[in-house]
Amino acid sequence: MRSTLFFLLLFMCAASFAAEDNFSFDTPEQRAQFLSLTSELRCPMCQNQNIADSDAMIAHDMRRKVYTLLKQGKSEQDVIDYMKARYGDFVHYKPPITIATFWLWAAPVLFVLLAFIFIVRRKKNEKTEDFQAKLAKADALLEQEKE
Amino acid sequence: MKKAPLVIIPLVMFSLLVVFLFKGLFSDPRALDSQVKGKLLPPFSLPDLMQPELIYEPADLKGEVTILNVWGVWCVTCAVEMPYLTQLKEEENVRIVGLYFDQDLDPDFGTKTLTRVQQEVTDMLSRYGNPYAFNIFDVYRDTSLDLGVTGAPEHFVIDAHGIIRMHHIGDINERVWSSKIGPLYRALVAEAKQNREGGE
């Protein structure tokens, strides 16, 4: 009984692997290109998955398209541009730098810089204030002694 | 002397953050910018679903304002919108062309025969009404990919010159038609009519 269950599980496991696509490549480099492309292209249907992970039909079709384009001898950038022309910048996990996305990188740096300037300035003010206050105190003491 | 403006800074930043996040509450993360809007239909050469010997090209959609409806029998929402689309066709004489694609038909293996697909389509159309002037069969789903289709149902409003004027993801119901698609469709029809009369 236990062994039957074991074998049943074993076969189910094999079946789940069989659901993946079968693509054959000319060179190992082409396979590597395919794997990297499908991991950095985003599925438009299920938004937090890349097309390698997603089981949506659109992801399936996009994988097939990536494969055929690579087979035609297109470069990785060509494939990315092809997908971007159809699904927009959205489809690539690396966003291009535009005026809108520029702030993603600039805002934290800018914030740190501003905070730094702010702190330095405040320190300076405090010091001069201290100094002035001490000077006033000393003057007062001197005045007192004079009397 | 400079104290007052400095105190305001955190408040201003906080308000900006609140505005930003509040806007985020109402933004639709699934909304995609269509890349085909304002462009001509991508070139294709695809067979009619029911008469495969008939081949359609983008030029066949020109001359009349058309709503291209991407659908399939496996798509539940498509079945839901079908009676309303049929009503639009009958009441407003809207020209709806189907771009049909099949889910089970793996182009590389071809596990499903064309006759079975046709049978399923005929069954479904006889049950829910047939809004289509004709159906284009996107066998390899290439044209759907070219159009930036993410699923079904999706709709493209195409003007008389064959230019895509709107890409609507999701179904067409009364609300969508009266607020979003209907006004554009009527404007385009009026424009096409004017052009035709102007040409004569």
Image (tube, coloured by chain):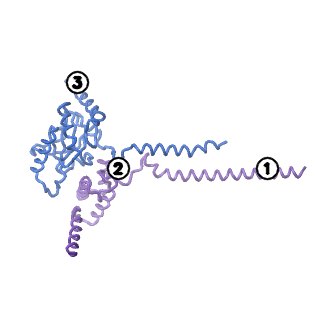
Chain colours: A purple, B blue
Q: Which residue is mark 2?
A: A90
Residue B91: quarter of image: top left
Residue A93 lies, in percent from the top left, at: 36, 54
Chain of the residue under the numbered disc 2 shown in the image: A
Residue A55 lies, in percent from the top left, at: 26, 57
Q: Quadrant of the C terminus of chain B?
A: top left
Give the mark toward the camera: 1 or 2.
1
Q: Which residue is mark 1?
A: A136
Label 2 neighbour load within 10 Å: few <14, some 14-19, many 20+ = some
Disc 1 to disc 3, C-alpha distance: 90 Å
Note whether B183 is above or below B57 in the view shown.
above
Q: Which residue is mark 3?
A: B198
Residue B19 lies, in percent from the top left, at: 47, 42
Chain of the residue under the numbered disc 1 shown in the image: A
Residue B63 lies, in percent from the top left, at: 19, 33
Disc 2 to disc 3, C-alpha distance: 42 Å
Q: Which mark is residue B73?
A: none
Q: Amino acid at mark 1?
A: Ala
Badge 1 element: helix
